[in-house]
Amino acid sequence: MKRRVLIVPLLVAFVLLVVAGVIRRLDSPEAVEERVEGVVVVIGAVERRNIEEILRYPGTLTPRQTVTVVPKVAGRVETIHVSEGERVAPGRLLISLDSQSIELQADQAYSAWQAALAQYRKAERGVREGELENARASYAQARDDLEAARRDLERSKRLYEAGTIARAKYEEAEAAFRSASTAVENAKRSLEMMEEGATSEELDSAKANAEALKARYDLAELQIAETRITASSYGTVASIMVDAGNMVAQGTPLIAIVGEDPIYAQVAIPEKYYGRFVDAKRRIAARVYPTAYGTERPYAGFVERVSPLIDPQSRTFTVEIALPNPSGRLKPGMYVNTDIIIDIRENALVVPESAVVRRDDRDVLFAVREGASAHATMIEIDPGLRSGGYVEIRSGLVGDEPIIVEGNAFLEDGQPVRVVTVE
């Protein structure tokens, strides 16, 4: 009990000695000098530079399109010319079908077309002089034959009436006369047709027949060409669905090709930015960072499509960023991070972000003003874009003031400062 009574006075005495020491320290020349010099600060310069407003969100790469290659003709798969994972260009031969039967059809169609064409040209050209002379001679001979048949009929009639010949012989003479009459009429008609030539209707009919047969031949040739199935665009063979030797019908899926150039980054963006995208007056640029390639330089692209729908569950909308991918290094399904540059201010007045502080719900910064001594002057500013450690200053600064970037956390307007240089 006595020991506790002795300790308390000793503690009180110790505290008094400490306080006295502090008071002497505050009154010392060194302390006075420190108070006069002010708060230690670091200054920076106001700059002019381009500043971007960037949205940073993850996304996934998706192909431009997936094309399923199908044949336009039926046939047997003869040769498959590509393998899965192979990149193809437009016109690249993918699959050959057996074309032997179609080639035979083409040969037949060609022969029929040439025959019809010859008939049309003959009708168009008209009858040759030699053919016309033969027709005239045939007509003259038919007339002579008719006259001979008439005389024979008259003689047979007299003999039959005289009872010299049988009725059958007389009837034979009658039949021969009728036949000779018909031959004269036919020869005459043939000669007249040769002399007059083909009518316009006959020429049109012959021409139409030749054209129809040519179209049949062209169709067969087209079918031969379609047995060689080629790629229609750039892409990568994702899967081959048939084997050599398979019989395939028209429209049977053969090969799936994924289009990868350009490739698209699909990114979900919060709904509050929707108007910024749909009202944009320029192409919105973006930088895409595939996580598969680590610190590799970003791929540059542009927002090509903005979804017209807002997802009611996530309150987001989707944008698609088109990326050139001629090398095929970017693959569908890759996870990426994106910088979407929704605004750019060129030659903006900017300060380091650390220079801007809050005072009484206002954005302010401190400039160093020289007078009797250096002191901090508080300036209310209107900040704009923030990016890359800088803040755009839309109003409040002229642009040539030295501003405080460190040591401003508790500064007040007019407070003395001491500027130091940070190496």
Image (cartoon, rainbow, N blue to C red):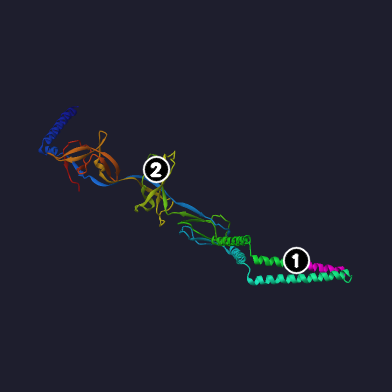
Q: Where is residue 200 in the image (x, y as percent from the top left)?
A: 62, 61
In the image, is residue 235 part of the stretch drawn in magenta? no
Q: Which mark is residue 210?
A: none
Q: Is residue 5 above or below residue 281?
A: above
Q: Residue 278 carries which label?
A: 2
Q: Is residue 128 left or right of residue 177?
A: left
Residue type at tag 2: Val
Real-space CA distance between mark 2 and mark 1, rounded to the nearest whole angstrom:
90 Å
Q: Which of 108 and 184 is in front in this view?
A: 184
Q: Magenta region's main secondary structure?
A: helix
Q: How many labels does the image show?
A: 2
Residues shaded magenta: 166-178
Corner quadrant of residue 116:
bottom right
Q: Is residue 5 left or right of residue 323?
A: left
In the image, is residue 176 part of the stretch drawn in magenta? yes
Q: Of circles 2 and 1, which is in front? A: 1
Question: Dot 2: what SS?
Answer: helix
Identify the residue at image location x=39%, y=46%. 58
Residue type at tag 1: Thr
Q: Position of residue 336 (x, y in %)?
A: 39, 49
Q: Residue 182 carries which label?
A: 1
Q: Position of residue 297 (x, y in %)?
A: 34, 53
Q: Position of residue 228 (x, y in %)?
A: 53, 61
Question: Dot 1: what SS?
Answer: helix
